[in-house]
Image: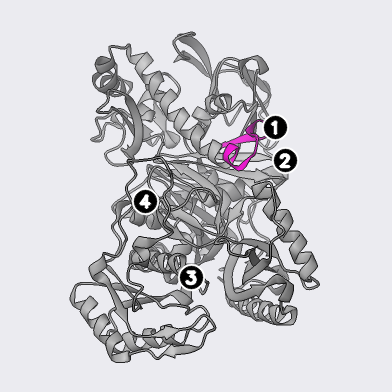
Amino acid sequence: MVAAGGGARIGVDIGGTFTDLVLTDAKGRTFQRKVSSTPAAPELAVLAGVREILDHAGVSASEVDEVVHGTTVGSNTLLQKVGAPTGLITTRGFRDVLEIGRLRTPGMFDLQWEKPLPLVPRRHRREVTERILATGAIHTPLDEAELVAAGRALAAEGIRSVAVCFLNSYRNPEHERRAEALLAEHLPDLQVTTSVSVLPEAKEYERTSTTVVNAYVRPVLEAYLTRLERGLGTIGISAALLVCNSNGALASSEVARAKPVFFISSGRAAGVVGGGRLGEALGEGDLVVFDMGGTTASASLIQGGNLMRVSEYEFRAGISTPSRFIKAGGYMMSVPTVDVAEVGSGAGSIAHVDEGGLMKVGPVSAGAEPGPACYGIGGDRPTVTDANLYLGYLPETLAGGSRTLSRDKAERAITRDLAEPFGLDAAVAAYGVREVVNSNMARAIRAVTVERGVDPRDFTLVAIGGSGPVHAVDIARLLAMPRVLVPASPGVFTAMGMLAGDVEHYLIRPLPGRLDGIDLDGARRIAAELSAEARERLLREGVAEDDISLQPEIDMRFRGQEMSLAVPFGEEADAAALRAAFLAAYGAIYSYASDDVIETVSLRLVGRGLRPGKLDFRHEQDAPEGAVGPSARRRVYFGPERGWMTTPIYDRAALRGRVEGPAVLQGADSTVLVPPDASAVTDSHGNLLITITEGSL
């Protein structure tokens, strides 16, 4: 991670439809680019975009200090079930932990819910003789011959990656480490992931599931990062490649290769980090960051300037959320993550009539290939983009003119698949697509506000993503949110957020016991050991000593509970202070706190390398000379009540001052819709604040 010396940094975010790139140079200038994603080989779009943005900025490859990357490879691998053939070796008697799970369902009364199939079929889960007690003592030694035989049997069945997870190994890792060494000796082509290398933490199901996800995704992400780094080398970029993790921070590509489970939500968390930095620059502490791309839409809460984070996440179809109240719906990963709710609704989501005769939008997406019908590159089914184009919300070109859209093709698809089956006018059918998808996306925002006991009306909605600003005001109106903030470059904001992130390492050690009997000296000793390890890693990656931040925390819970909460563990902390902090945190989430015994579970540490050269959102933009009026006018449809309205079209980059709705503001990376009963005003940073008329909420 040592800088190459040129001062240029590139942020890359791969989406389902477009790959976004942002470059900042030594002079503080910012450049952006959008290129079509290449789902079959995502690195091709990245490399094409890097070449284009270097040429556009007039920067040579040798001037690039680092490439910061957010990738959907991990999440797509889970979503499409295209991971490596994976096996599991575990303690005898624990073969079915993955299927038993938590003995819960996400919805008590959902009779149609189907439990997701384990990533490792039962025939590929093997048991071996060994047993470590909860104290860490060895009860039954590891049967090494049995272990090697299990590994050979899995390899003979085509298994490429194996997870090793033994009972209580978090207290004593000896058996897992020995198993790893034996498999490496006898089966060198078999990739091995041990639970102690990923998550040395209590709770068998969570640890096993996290380790299996890591093993399942690891060969795929490794191969992708290898191809990407090789491609960057051919361009002439020798700088470090950093990957954004699920917690919104950055880590080296080496860490991402070994522990991909920490990077499943890579990318989307960066937009939330960018939203937090933007709010800090503008003095706005209460925000809901809404990100709508081509395939999905997500929402996350920033309250009092603090990003909401949790210590576990379930990846599942429909709506994915790390909610503490919804469990067992997907693949559990006990890793730190930004608290993001995500739904399968994006600009490329396909609208269709279901078997019951109702209109549905998503979760299937046309993506970049074959794309919406209006792209004219093979797709012929109506999508959200087709609806927005036909209604007049979008221009005839996207991504700075690199993608030409056909309104006629959009109209034909909408008429054939939606308007005619319902007996509706094409405009009414297209507007119905918007209403359905807006309702879906409002659900994600409710998941991080109302379902957390937070009133969204007290927050400002930050709209990012290529399609977020086209829908934001209508969604805000559904939630009675009076204000929408659109950043200066919303379409590439996630890539910008990566350039505003810090490097991070995540370490954990078990610390079981009662809080009232805690060994504070022992806890401080563990914290010191973890701090030394994190500091050594960060220094090795080129982070300066003065830029290292170490934050130890203790996971605690009431006696008998399954879940725990993290509480900061300062140098002077004692049992009374820890108890008070835990009760306050617990009460803030659940609105009450018990007087029961409190237990400590583990001690974790987040080591961050603060990056002094990261992107600053306080940079002011030069105002255009003179008043800037509309560049054109076109007919835009605002629903059955208002119908078609002749609407002024503005150049977003040149606009300053106040605009009354209706208006459409077009930019190179995104389009902003200001409907009737709303007004917008720009600030000196190029951001746009949209206010909804109180009577229309």
Which residue position is annotated with label 3?
255
**Is residue 126 shown left or right of residue 512?**
left
Q: Is 108 one of the magenta-colored residues? A: no
Badge 4: residue crowd in 10 Å (few <14, some 14–19, many ≥20) = many
Helix, strand or loop at mark 4: helix
- The residue wearing badge 2 is 282
Q: Are marks 3 and 2 in contact (CB under 8 Å)?
A: no
Q: CA distance from mark 2 to mark 1?
A: 10 Å
Pick whichever of labels 1 and 4 is earlier in the sequence: 4
Q: Residue beneath label 1, please?
A: 683
Amino acid type, callout 2? Leu
Q: Nearer the viewer, mark 1 or mark 3?
A: 3
In which quadrant is the N terminus drawn?
bottom right
State whether residue 52 is above or below residue 224. Answer: above
Q: Residue at x 47, y 76 (%)?
A: 197
Work out how far the residue at label 4 is from the one at label 2, CA to CA, in angstroms: 34 Å
- Separation (CA) of disc 1 from disc 3: 40 Å
What span is in magenta? Answer: 449-464
N-terminal of the pair, mark 2 or mark 1, is: 2
Towards the viewer: 117 or 137:
137
Instruction: Report if residue 345 is visible in the image.
Output: yes
Vertical placement of 364 versus 477: above or below? Answer: below
Quadrant that contains the C terminus? top right
Query: Residue 570's image quarter?
Result: bottom right
